[in-house]
Image (cartoon, rainbow, N blue to C red):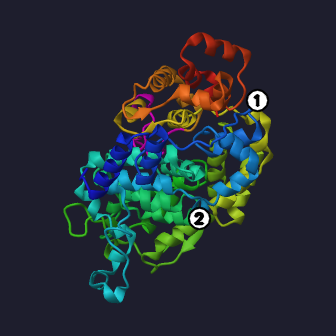
Amino acid sequence: MTLTRRHFVAGGAAAVLAGGSGCTKADVAAAKRWFGKPAAPALPKTLTPPAAAEIDWPMHVLNRLTFGARPGDHARVTAMGAEAFIAEQLAPARIDDDACARVIRHEFESLADPESTLFPRQDDAKDPLAQLFPAMKDKGARVGHLYEYKEKVLLEDLTRATLLRAVLSERQLFEVMVQFWSDHFNIDPSKADAKWLKAADDRDVIRAHALGRFRDLLRASAVSPAMLWYLDGRVNRKGKPEDRPNENYARELLELHTLGVHGGYTQQDVIETARCLTGWTVRDRKKFFRGRVEFQPRQHDDGPKRVLGTEIPAGLGARDLDRVLEILTAHPATARHLAEKLCRRFIADEPPAAAVAATASAFAQSGGSIPATLRALFATPEFKAPEYRGTKFKRPFHFVVSALRAANAETDAGKPVIDHLLRLGHAPFRYATPDGYPETATHWRNGLLWRWNFAAALAENRIKGTRVEPAELQRRLGGEAALMATVLGRTPTAAERAAFAESEAGLALLVASPGFQYA
């Protein structure tokens, strides 16, 4: 990473405060947060742990809509009301997240948005580049700067930024949905130019639309430079009568992104969809304006098509893409497929049929509004039912982040944390196939030993770049029982209290315990 004046200013300020007479740990932590350095979040002055013997409604909402409760979160959500917290999280733009944003800006210059930094917006009349090359106005054309970084640097920055956002962001549901859509539209960045372009996909596709409209998200993904590389859309051409379209992206578009494997499409629908998508390509790293997405009319099959029983007339050109996406988004199978996946994520591995139906109906009636769809899901009796609380086995990423949040850890999300996720099999952006990381518990139960190892390393401060202070946290909370209730989200059982007292490993035991493995 290139050192900038900002790094020296931030580092110097922290050093001055650390060396100043009378300076406390809290002062240093506050300085780090102000200057954008990773630091443990500031805790409320008064910490009230959960008092119920079972997971209550506020804790259930925290467990499902976030990557884990921090000390003080349960009391805050209880005070404001769980429904108000849900409404707050569904409108992330209204949530002050400056502290997290400062960390991301400070740590990851490679992930900066060129729309607002490298390429400030100008009026076209004053922008000769925009006059000469109108496509340069599009974000999809502004990814060339990513090729200036080594691909390993980009992957590490993406991974660390994802971890830090999950740990630090106040927009927790947004970050949960970013992960959900990253799996849904999975791209393996080890393939060709996706090594560089996945960073733009994360920024301009997933994060830009994670709580927007599904139609916009789907369209952005279809013309994402990284997706065009990953699923071979860039070589889907019909330049000669004998050319056959490349079906790779079309098949995944129907099977994974929209209708689902049982969505009722045929092989002919795959072929016709692939024909609609011919002509879209992206410039490789050896060309001028590398990473720029283009539509090449001469490589497009502009004849009539029929997709899922709907006629698409000849002569639409690039508009074939939008027409086929409209058909797919409006199809009932898409609503069912997405509703089932969302209910599996937020309710149970075997999603209840009634909740799926209500969620699919909301998706269809809202025209694919993701917030409206989630609002309906969170209002279902099944989501609220006590029998589903504490029953979702945490995927490894969720487990690691929830441990960091519960312990109020200070972390730089560096290589040692990433190494733990790699051993657990759930490091972001490492899944090779288009279906994304599995959601259900059956895939993840074999990694318990690595979870226990992480718990011990975290509690004993053996993860370089990450630090916890369990004794101080226990003191702030008011004793062992309060610490246990805060981490577990409920009061501990007699057996858990006895094990905690006998173990002499307090925090490690809690994080490794069966009660912490479920949300």
Residue 165 sits inside the magenta stretch: no
Q: Is residue 458 left or right of residue 332?
A: left
Say what amino acid the circle numbered 1 marks.
Glu
Q: Residues within 10 Å of mark 1 (few under 14, many from 20)?
A: some
Q: Decide if residue 260 is in sight here.
A: no
Residue 302 in the image: state x and y as whole percent: 41, 75
Q: Nearer the viewer, residue 116 or 189?
A: 116
Q: What residue is drawn where x is 19% and y is 62%?
A: 286
Residue hosting label 1: 54
Q: What residue is drawn where x is 40% and y is 53%?
A: 35
Residue hosting label 2: 213
Q: Residue furthest top?
A: 502
Q: Residues within 10 Å of mark 2 (few under 14, many from 20)?
A: some
Q: Is residue 461 left or right of residue 503?
A: left
Q: Nearer the viewer, residue 518 or 318?
A: 518
Residue 188 in the image: state x and y as whole percent: 38, 46
| Residue 44, label in figure | none
Give the vertical position of 95 relative to 506 (above or below). below
Could you give the CA–CA distance between mark 1 and mark 2, rounded to whole angstroms? 36 Å
Q: What residue is drawn where x is 64% and y is 54%?
A: 89
Q: Main secondary structure of the magenta part?
A: loop
Give the vertical position of 183 relative to 443 (above or below). below
Say what amino acid the circle numbered 2 marks.
Arg
Q: Residue furthest left?
A: 286
Task: Provide the residue span drawn in magenta.
Answer: 421-438
